[in-house]
């Protein structure tokens, strides 16, 4: 069974898509079987993975509405991970799902059909806490929260954490915060250092050790339809996402050793 991580923060422009695509690629480069689900109607993760969102039909919309088999919709990307593409059709899917039964469980049910083929499934969420994001949080084991190290960074976090608690209570008891990821970090900026210190103070070891620096190559890569390690593998951005993949893999291993320990103790 794959571990499912939702990359979520209702704030736009914090690095959700950049993290989803480049973490997917870095995990794939480390020989992990990875599926990236683009759940944002903007389709940025789809384009940044080298797949034309305008041609992506069927896509996540039909999967959520149970109008296409998920296995038929997946696309293998150049970087070696599979993609469930998304585009503006997801907005229509969200509207149609509003009146549906078990509307928050649709993605979970679909991913369950293919979950045994992957080590990790990453879900790139839209910048909202509405039904598409609720589907991601209902399907997920963990939430990866990119936080841009700037003044208003902490502001939306409490409503995101409230939503995560509500989902845990009502829809998905196993949901955990995987970690907060500092993105677009600039060492020369005092504010960034202050925000980073505040994050650690509030959230302790939920703040991931890896830090993603501000790096122009990360911003350029999507227009070439390539994850950073294909576009410029020596860049600071590429190295940071390889580091993040290593940290995620180490945490998974620590968790499975812990679980195995619990089993033996029984
Ligand atoms: P979100 O998905 O949260 O809206 P994106 O990943 O699309 O955020 O990032 C917003 C913008 O910032 C994009 O133009 C992206 O290329 C750029 N960006 C993201 N991370 C970095 C980074 N570490 N350094 C420089 N630019 C970045
Ligand atoms: Mg995005």
Image (cartoon, helix red, strand yellow):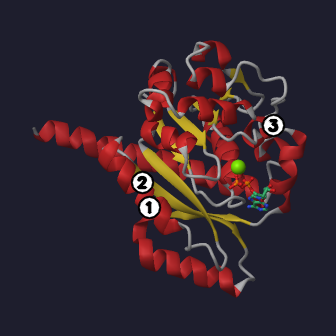
Image quadrant of residue 121? top right
Write down which quadrant ligand 1 falls in.
bottom right
Q: Where residue 117 appears, x then y in whole percent? A: 51, 20
Q: Secondary structure at mark 1?
A: helix
Q: Position of residue 77 (x, y in %)?
A: 74, 27
Q: Position of residue 43 (x, y in %)?
A: 75, 38
Instruction: Give me the C-alpha separation between circle 3 and circle 2.
Output: 28 Å
Residue situated furthest front in the rendering: 99
All told, the count of numbered labels is: 3
Query: Residue 171, image x and y in percent?
Result: 35, 41
Residues at marks 2 and 1 touching, judged by CB atoms closer than 8 Å:
yes
Name the residue carrying label 1: 161
**Who is closer to the viewer here, 153 or 235?**
153
Nearest the camera: 193 or 32?
193
Q: Which residue is mark 2?
A: 164
The residues tagged by marks 3 and 1 sit, at their Cα atoms, a distance apart of 29 Å
Residue 82 is drawn in which quadrant? top right
At a point 34% along the width and 46% down the height, the residue shown is 255
Q: Is mark 3 within 8 Å of ligand 1?
A: no
Q: Earlier in the sequence, mark 3 or mark 1?
A: 3
In the visual, does 215 lie left or right of 205?
right
Q: Residue at x 57, y 25 (%)?
A: 64
| Tag of residue 47 | 3
Numbered disc 2: secondary structure: helix
Give the left or right position of residue 86, taking residue 219 as reference.
left
| Among the two numbered marks 3 and 2 on one chain, the one whose residue lies closer to the N terminus | 3
- Dot 2, crowdedness within 10 Å: few (<14), some or many (≥20)? many
Q: Mark 1 packing: few (<14 Cα in 10 Å), some, or many (20+)? A: some
């Amino acid at each position: 069974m794959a571990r499912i991580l939702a990359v979520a923060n209702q704030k736009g422009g914090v690095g959700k898509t950049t993290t989803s695509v480049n973490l997917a690629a870095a995990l794939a480069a480390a020989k992990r079987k990875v599926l990236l689900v683009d759940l944002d109607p903007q389709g940025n993760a789809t384009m940044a993975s080298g797949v034309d969102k305008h041609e992506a039909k069927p896509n996540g919309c039909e999967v959520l509405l149970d109008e296409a088999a998920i296995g038929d919709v997946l696309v293998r990307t150049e970087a070696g991970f599979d993609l469930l593409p998304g585009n503006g059709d997801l907005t229509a899917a969200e509207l149609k799902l509003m009146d549906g039964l078990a509307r928050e469980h649709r993605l979970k049910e679909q991913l369950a059909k293919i979950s045994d083929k992957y080590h990790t499934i990453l879900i790139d969420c839209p910048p909202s806490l509405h039904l598409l994001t609720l589907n991601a949080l209902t399907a997920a084991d963990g939430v990866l929260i990119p936080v841009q190290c700037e003044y208003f960074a902490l502001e939306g976090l409490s409503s995101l954490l409230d939503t995560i608690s509500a989902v845990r209570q009502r829809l998905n008891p196993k949901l955990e915060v995987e970690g907060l990821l500092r993105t677009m970090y600039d060492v020369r900026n005092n504010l960034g250092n202050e925000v980073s210190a505040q994050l650690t103070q509030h959230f302790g070891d939920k703040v991931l050790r890896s830090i993603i620096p501000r790096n122009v190559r990360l911003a350029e890569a999507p227009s070439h339809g390539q994850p950073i390690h294909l576009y410029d593998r020596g860049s600071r951005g590429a190295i940071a996402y390889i580091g993040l993949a290593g940290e995620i893999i180490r945490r998974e291993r620590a968790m499975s050793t812990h679980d195995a320990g619990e089993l033996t103790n029984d």
